[in-house]
Amino acid sequence: MENPEENEAGEVLIKPQILSASERLAAKKRFRTQRRLSTMKNKVLRNAQWATLKKEKRKLKKEGQKQRKKEAEALGDQAPPKQIPRTIENTREADVTTVDHEDEEITFDITHDEYEAYFSKTYEPKILITSSDNPHSKTIHFIRELTKIFPSSECQWRKRSSVKKMIQSAKEKDYTDVVVINEDRRVPNGMLVSHLPDGPTAYFKISNVKLTKDMKYKNIIKEFTSHRPEVILNNFQTRLGQAVSRMLASLFHYDPQFKGRRAVTFHNQRDYIFFRHHRYEFKSQKRAALRELGPRFTLRLKWLQKGTFDTIEGDYEWIIAGKRHEMETSRRRFFL
């Protein structure tokens, strides 16, 4: 801890606090307890001791926070800056593909891609959503909820047709995107997104699927309106992340209808893309409230391919080769 003092010139000095004998004794006791717990074989007693030790640490942490707050109030404008905790996000390794939006050449390359026509507002997206053969109830409900989220989307069952045939049929019917939902053990576990007519194609792993009926509020499906939602894309920092974010954005209409007060969020954190669907309400001129409509799920990119779906002769821009941990050489290295 630090205590503020003033010298003869009136300057505020920070003097480190000296621990009392009782505090030093308590610190030694905690250290010995921690060492003893690492060798304790009785699991029940070990867990109980750990719980007590963690409770003491939390108490000391809160006392330290209160002390620092008092010192900051006493120092006023001369208080030291607030401590910023070290996290995996703010200590991530630098990537050569990180996008600098002030670089005109990089911005030109990103904006002149397969989605240039969409962002130029030359066409409206028309999406075909399908599934693997013989989908089960949870996958069927999930697909039906996706058709209510994506504007101008239609659901069509596979009927034992291959993905390539579905894509070719979608091209002939002037669809702009095809979304295929895969399942495993009766639960959605993968999503294939293919942009038509010339790609690209991406495959995502789906996890933590929670349908609208499983949300906190009952009968919330009735609050789904036909208004086009706003789209929020957050924390996509690299060239690969920008490509993925533009692909996800192109599934929605570029002109949202603000009257519906619906917002769709794709938040990237540590290469996991969290999907949330909210409806916001204005409580007053300064306050607003969010109401989650669902569904919610998490995406993780497995591969990105040029052109439409072709797993044999396709040209992969990015793919997980072998096991994922072979690419992840560090916990602080991210690709999106």
Image (cartoon, grey):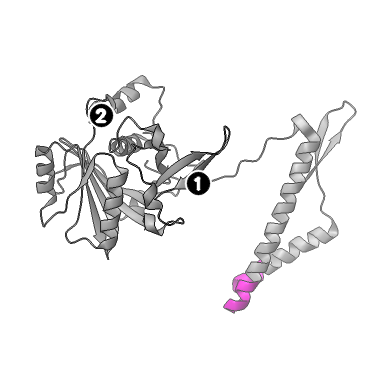
> For the residue labelled by badge 1, is the local secondary structure a helix, a strand or a loop?
loop
User: What amino acid type is highlighted by mark number 1?
Assistant: Ile
| Disc 1: CA contacts within 10 A as few (<14), some (14-19) or many (>=20) | few
Q: Position of residue 196 (x, y in %)?
A: 17, 37
Is residue 205 found left or right of 198 in the rendered image? right
Cβ–Cβ under 8 Å for marks 2 and 1:
no
- Furthest toward the top, the residue is 104
Stretch of the chain drawn in magenta: 34-48
Could one spot residue 41 in this view of the protein? no
Relative to 254, residue 170 above or below: below
Q: Residue at x 22, y 25 (%)?
A: 122
Q: As rendered, which of 139 and 203 lies closer to the eye?
A: 139
Q: Which residue is mark 1?
A: 88
Q: Is residue 47 magenta?
A: yes
Which quadrant of the structure image shows residue 5?
Answer: top right
Q: As rendered, which of 227 and 239 lies closer to the eye?
A: 227
Q: Earlier in the sequence, mark 2 or mark 1?
A: 1
> For the residue labelled by badge 2, is the local secondary structure a helix, a strand or a loop?
helix
Q: Which residue is mark 2?
A: 118
